[in-house]
Amino acid sequence: MTRSPRLEPVTPATVDAALALRVHPRQERNVAPVATSLAEAYAYGETAWPRLILDGDRIVGFVMAFLDIAWREEEDPSDRRSGLWRLNIAADAQGAGYGRFAVGAVAAELRRRGHRRMYVTWEPGEDGPGEFYRRLGFRTTGEESGGQVVGVLDL
């Protein structure tokens, strides 16, 4: 990182740059593109918290949190969770700490909102982000969601 990274909302002035963001080709199967995330953010309204990751004026990534989503409503309507929904770091910006920064920023936002846990799901496998999340302190819950591993971090 060259400067202090920060999170900013996606605006009409930044949406095209956000849509152009690309992860490393070997990661494309592990994370949906920003266009999908922005469509989901629109559809989910206030339960989605999409943000760009900037370093100076450069967009280096995209992160989206989910807020108070019913987890398994049929089984337990009171089980509502918040956490990291998407994390896309530009291919040429990886390895510089932006992912770690983004996860920390989402954790801080969830703490500010009074949450005690932060959830994340990831694609299992060699090229998946599981090891990254484990290094940040997430532990697996033993659950799956859509074939993905579910992890949790105590805040």
Image: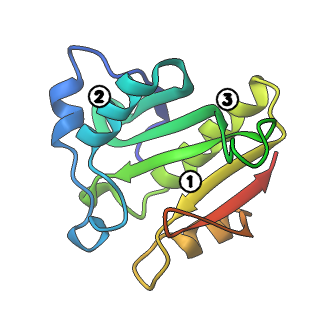
Residue farthest toward the front in the current orientation of the protein? 74
User: Residue at position x 36%, y 52% from top?
Assistant: 89
- N-terminal-most mark, 3 or 2: 2
Image vertical order of residue 147 relative to residue 64, above or below:
below
Image-based side of 63 in relation to 90, left or right: right
Residue at image location 26% in from the left, 74% down from the top: 26
Query: Quadrant location of residue 137?
Result: bottom right
Classify the position of the C terminus by image quarter: top right
Label 2 sits on residue: 57
Question: Residue placed at 24% from the left, 34% from the top?
Answer: 18
User: Is residue 75 shown left or right of residue 60?
Assistant: right
Of the residues shown, which amino acid type is indicated by label 3?
Glu
The kind of residue on which mark 1 rests is Arg
> What is the distance, in whole Å, between disc 2 and disc 1 at their CAs?
19 Å
Q: Around disc 2, counting alpha carbons within 10 Å, would you say few (fewer than 14), some (14 to 19), or many (20 or more)?
A: few
Which sits in the foreground, 148 or 137? Answer: 148
Q: Residue at x 25, y 58 (%)?
A: 92
Vertical position of residue 100 compared to residue 56: above or below: below
Residue position for label 3: 109
- The crowding category of the residue bearing disc 1, from other C-alpha atoms within 10 Å (few below 14, some 14 to 19, many at least 20), is some
Q: Which mark is residue 100?
A: 1
In three-dimensional space, the C-alpha distance between marks 3 and 2, rounded to whole angstroms, equals 22 Å
Looking at the image, is mark 2 or mark 1 nearer the viewer? 1
Classify mark 2: helix, strand or loop.
loop
Measured along the vertical axis of the image, is residue 99 above or below residue 76?
A: below
Mark sitting earlier along the chain (2/1): 2
Q: Position of residue 142 (x, y in %)?
A: 73, 72
> Closest to the observer: 137 or 115?
115
* 145 is higher (above) or lower (below) than 129: above
Mark 3: few/some/many CA within 10 Å (<14, 14-19, 20+) = some
